[in-house]
Amino acid sequence: RKFIREKNIKAFTMYDIDKYGIGSVMDQALTHLLEKDPSRPIHVSYDIDAVDPAHAPATGTTVRGGLTYREAHFVGEAVAMSGCLASVE
């Protein structure tokens, strides 16, 4: 956590998503990423392990309590709607 803070990396946990909701968390993340350059390209590397196994049962690392189907979909929608989505893997 110290390294993350020192490097000014904005990080969110499931606690943050539960407390603030995925919409607010994505707004905060995108604001942080785009504050210096509102048109900077964003690359998304989506790890399916973040999704709850009830919604992604074939994931290699199943851990209950991950993103719901709608939350997982919203992440992609929010980045795409920013107009800055450059690539996804």
Image (spheres, rainbow, N blue to C red):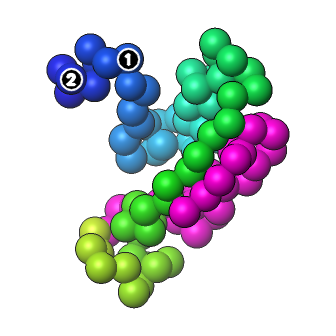
| On screen, residue 88 above or below 25 | below
Where is residue 84 drawn, in percent x and y? 74, 38
User: Residue 42 placed where, x, y %?
Assistant: 63, 40
Measured in 3D between alpha carbons, the distance from the residue under mark 2 to the one under mark 1, in whole angstroms, is 9 Å
Reading the chain from its start, which is encountered first: label 2 or label 1?
2
The residue that label 1 is drawn on is 8
- Rendered residue at 57%/22% (across/down): 32
Q: Vertically, is 71 above or below 37?
A: below
* Residue drawn at point x = 50 percent, y = 78 percent: 55
Q: Which residue is mark 2?
A: 3
Q: Reply yes or no: does residue 7 show up in magenta.
A: no
Q: Is 72 displayed left or right of 64 in the figure? A: right
Please indicate, yes or no, whether residue 78 appears anywhere in the rendered image.
no
Image position, residue 10 (x, y; %): 43, 26
Image position of 66 with respect to 40: above or below: below
Q: Which amino acid type is marked by label 2?
A: Phe
Which of the 4 image quadrants contains residue 73? bottom right
Magenta stretch?
64-89
- Give the residue at x 64% y 13%: 36
Q: Is residue 80 left or right of residue 45?
A: right
Q: Secondary structure at mark 2?
A: helix
At label 1, counting other C-alpha atoms closer than 10 Å, the crowd grade (few under 14, some 14-19, many 20 or more) is few
* Residue nearest the observer in this picture, 23 or 75: 75
Count the marks: how many?
A: 2
Q: Quadrant of the C terminus?
A: bottom right
Q: Is residue 85 visible?
A: yes
Circle 1: element type: loop
Residue 46 - label: none
Q: Amino acid at mark 1?
A: Asn
Image coordinates of residue 86 in percent, x first then y, are 70, 47
Label 2: few (<14), some or many (≥20) within 10 Å? few
